[in-house]
Image: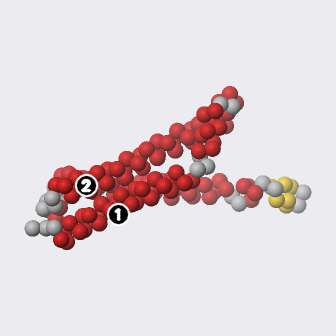
């Protein structure tokens, strides 16, 4: 506790934790949106064959790129679903005294502090997208007829 005059102020309150979390959540949402848009946009380009530049790319490369892009989008959607469920449980546990005593609430409260889950999924998505993008660039530069 931090003493300020006669008042005791918790460290969380003094650092504006709520403001930091809201800012983090905005960046998290923005990054997830960019990942999903990039992945879906890339899949659409390859599936529809609308972009003439990609029409000569061999099917095996297109398939791998689509799999990587779709996989990146899928793990982001799974992460969003997990976060939604966890945060609902934490919210409801704070509102409902009986649910607040449940094992589900305690587990959700614990998991909600595991930042590494978000970072790991974002790194997996980023790696998949970088690999897919490099495959496209290499294929366009060296494997065109």
Which residue is more in the foreground, 88 or 110?
A: 110
Dot 2: element: helix
Q: Is residue 34 visible?
A: no
Image-quadrant location for residue 92: top right
Q: Residue at x 60, y 34 (%)?
A: 104
Q: Is residue 9 visible?
A: yes
Dot 1: element: helix
Vertical relation: 13 (above or below) 87: below
- Res 130 label: 1
Q: Which residue is mark 2?
A: 64
Q: Residues within 10 Å of mark 1 (few under 14, many from 20)?
A: some
User: How far is the residue under mark 2 from the one under mark 1?
Assistant: 13 Å
Q: Quadrant of the N terminus?
A: bottom right
Which residue is more in the foreground, 110 or 54?
A: 110
| For marks 2 and 1 on the same chain, the one whose residue lies earlier in the sequence | 2
Q: Residue at x 50, y 56 (%)?
A: 119
In the figure, is residue 142 to the left or right of 18? left
Image coordinates for residue 70, horizontal then vertical, percent: 32, 50
Q: Residue furthest right?
A: 6
Image-quadrant location for residue 99: top right
Image coordinates for residue 145, horizontal then vertical, percent: 9, 67
Q: Residue at x 56, y 57 (%)?
A: 24
Q: Residues within 10 Å of mark 2 (few under 14, many from 20)?
A: some
Image coordinates for residue 30, horizontal then vertical, percent: 46, 57
Q: Residue at x 35, y 60 (%)?
A: 129
């Amino acid at each position: 506790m931090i003493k300020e005059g006669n008042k005791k102020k918790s460290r969380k309150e003094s650092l504006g934790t709520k403001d930091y979390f809201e800012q983090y959540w905005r960046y998290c949402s923005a990054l997830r949106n960019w990942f999903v848009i990039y992945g879906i946009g890339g899949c659409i380009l390859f599936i529809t064959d609308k972009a003439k530049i990609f029409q000569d790319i061999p099917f095996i490369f297109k398939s791998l790129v689509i799999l990587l892009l779709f996989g990146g989008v899928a793990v982001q959607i799974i992460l969003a679903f997990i976060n939604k469920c966890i945060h609902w449980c934490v919210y409801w546990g704070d509102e409902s005294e009986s649910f607040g005593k449940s094992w589900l609430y305690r587990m959700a409260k614990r998991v909600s502090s595991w930042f590494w889950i978000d970072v790991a999924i974002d790194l997996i998505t980023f790696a998949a997208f970088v690999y897919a993008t490099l495959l496209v660039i290499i294929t366009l530069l060296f494997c065109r007829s």
